[in-house]
Amino acid sequence: MKSQNAGHDDARHEGRARTPSASSGGASATGRSDAARSGTARQAAVVHFENVGLRYGMGPEVLRDLTFSIEPGSFQFLTGPSGAGKTTLMRLILLALKPTRGFISVFGQDVSHISGEALTGLRRRMGVVFQDFRLLDHLTTYENVALPLRVQGREEATYRSEVVELLRWVGLGERMHVLPPVLSGGEKQRAAIARALIVRPEMLLADEPTGNVDPGLGRRLLRLFIELNRLGTSVLIATHDLQLMDQVDARRLVLGEGRLHIYD
Ligand SMILES: Nc1ncnc2c1ncn2[C@@H]1O[C@H](COP(=O)(O)OP(=O)(O)O)[C@@H](O)[C@H]1O
Ligand SMILES: [Mg+2]
């Protein structure tokens, strides 16, 4: 647990140190990205939206005129009724969807005209917990959590203890060698969280992370997210679980009828 903490801390500092040189080159020089970049001189917002709108195909606008920022090291809930657009908003932040209009910057970089490679670089700085976990059933829990590091081409010897330690941190120390179909819903949820954290993301996005667990485990997961945030990671949790949100005095981004209302 201790060295996991230190690890996250280190990753963050490395991330910051890397930011100015690695992220400001290459973006298109529109007036807006210049504006976004002058913001980076202080400390760039992790996410910035300006008048963002999104529609699927020829459908109605699901999100309308969204303007907000997520600051480094901040913690917030994203809420609103089912169908309000929480998952859609997360997919915009993850750069899995393009806005139909408006401007988005991530880690201080205008994302409207960047290369696929730069996009991958930005995505690597985010950890995601999907609503449906997306664990691979033919890999053990350990292998699932280690997968993002394998994909990066790292040797197992360099990350084995890290993965084991993280699995213990989320309470899966005894379950690391079983396949996901054997895990309970709550265990799958924690495996998905561990897989999101293993890359030491600067921002964590979790979509309804307590949707499939009992209230007790929900509270434990929330404490885990809070601790992660204390270590410096920006956290955005999409949820419509009022009981969960009432446990923390945190910022709320509330979606309704396509619009966003913010309660700081
Ligand atoms: N791939 C898609 N194609 C068309 N419509 C979609 C798609 N995904 C979501 N929607 C619609 O967008 C709206 C917002 O959905 P979503 O972002 O999943 O909301 P939430 O996560 O808050 O429940 C809903 O009306 C939904 O039906
Ligand atoms: Mg959703």
Image (cartoon, helix red, strand yellow):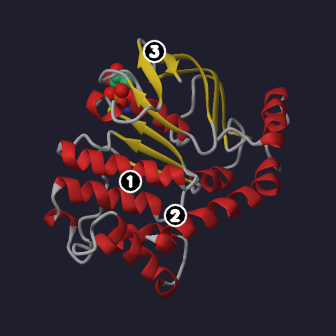
- How far is disc 1 from disc 3 in space, using C-alphas? 30 Å
Give the SS element for disc 1.
Answer: helix
- How far is disc 3 from disc 2 in space, using C-alphas? 32 Å
Q: Amino acid at mark 3?
A: Gly
Q: Position of residue 53 (x, y in %)?
A: 56, 19
Q: Amino acid at mark 1?
A: Leu
- How far is disc 1 from disc 2 in space, using C-alphas? 16 Å
Residue ID for mark 3: 258
Q: Is residue 113 above or below residue 159?
A: above
Q: Amino acid at mark 2?
A: Val
Instruction: Tell me if residue 19 can be seen.
Output: yes
Residue ID for mark 1: 224
**Label 1 vs 3, first from the N-terminus:** 1
Q: Position of residue 13 (x, y in %)?
A: 69, 61
Residue ID for mark 2: 199
Q: Is residue 257 above or below residue 95?
A: above
Give the SS element for disc 3.
Answer: loop
Give the SS element for disc 2.
Answer: loop
Q: Is mark 3 within 8 Å of ligand 1?
A: no
Q: Residue at x 50, y 20 (%)?
A: 263
Q: Residue at x 38, y 68 (%)?
A: 145
153 with respect to 142 (left or right): right
**Label 3 vs 2, first from the N-terminus:** 2
Q: Which quadrant holds residue 219?
A: top left
Instruction: Tell me if residue 132 can be seen.
Output: no
Q: Residue at x 51, y 41 (%)?
A: 96
